[in-house]
Image (spheres, helix red, strand yellow):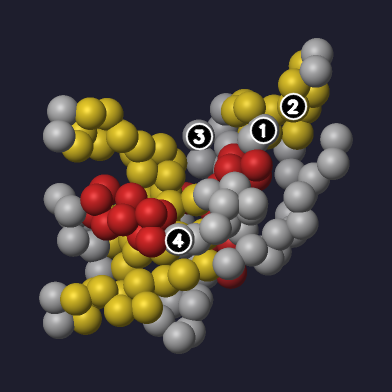
């Protein structure tokens, strides 16, 4: 299996093959998931949050369920603060997906009911962080903020 190079730290990834399909073990949920390019990015970004930004696994939810206009949606990564309040939302895309206005619109839509202080979109190669400042989200020059 050929793995994708990302602009994230590498780590010992737990992968197994069943038939023609590959699976990766989720760092948070501890279950085997189909290894897609987006899942590859999600697991590497989780590793980055845990090892580089000292985010607690216990305060992290993956594929957090959300009801939006009667439709079921899932937030890729939702980080909670020590008071169990959501504080950071991350939307992961496969490396070949451009971080476009459509991706920004997607995370903004998911965030409408939270209004979190930090948002991030990533395709594993590029990571765009947005900070809520005076009621408006601003793209951060330092693309590695974590509260």
Question: What residue sits 61% from the left and 58% below the top?
Answer: 124
Name the side, left or right, on which 99 lies relative to 131: right
| Figure quadrant of residue 130 | bottom left
Circle 4 or circle 3, nearest the eye:
4
Circle 1 or circle 3, nearest the eye:
1
Residue 100, disc? 4
Q: Residue furthest bottom?
A: 141
Q: Which residue is mark 3?
A: 29
Question: What residue sits 23% from the left and 62% below the top?
Answer: 116
Image quarter in which the C terminus is found: bottom left
Q: What is the x, y in percent for residue 31?
A: 57, 27
Instruction: Say whether residue 40 is visible.
Output: yes
* Badge 1 or badge 3: first in the primary sequence: 3
* Badge 2 or badge 1: first in the primary sequence: 2
Residue 22, disc? 2
Is label 1 in a helix, a strand or a loop?
Answer: loop
Circle 1 or circle 4, nearest the eye:
4
Question: What residue sits 67% from the left and 33% below the top?
Answer: 35
Q: Which residue is mark 1?
A: 35
The span from disc 2 to disc 4 (Cα, nearest Å) is 29 Å
* Badge 2 or badge 4: first in the primary sequence: 2
Count of numbered badges drawn on the protein: 4
State if disc 1 and disc 2 touch (CB < 8 Å): yes
* Badge 2 or badge 3: first in the primary sequence: 2
Name the side, left or right, on which 110 lies relative to 121: left
Is label 3 in a helix, a strand or a loop?
Answer: loop
């Amino acid at each position: 299996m050929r793995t994708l190079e990302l602009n994230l730290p590498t780590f010992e990834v737990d992968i197994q093959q069943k038939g023609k399909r590959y699976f990766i073990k989720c760092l948070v949920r501890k279950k085997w998931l189909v290894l897609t390019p987006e899942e590859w990015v999600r697991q590497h970004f989780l590793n980055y949050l845990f090892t580089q930004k000292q985010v607690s696994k216990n305060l992290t939810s993956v594929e957090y369920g959300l009801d939006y206009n009667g439709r079921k949606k899932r937030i890729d990564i939702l980080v909670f603060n020590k008071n169990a309040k959501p504080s950071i939302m991350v939307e992961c895309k496969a490396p070949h997906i451009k971080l476009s206005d459509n991706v920004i619109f997607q995370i903004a839509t998911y965030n409408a009911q939270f209004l979190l202080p930090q948002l991030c979109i990533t395709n594993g190669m590029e990571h765009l962080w947005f900070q809520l400042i005076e009621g408006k989200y601003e793209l951060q020059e330092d693309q590695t903020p974590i509260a």
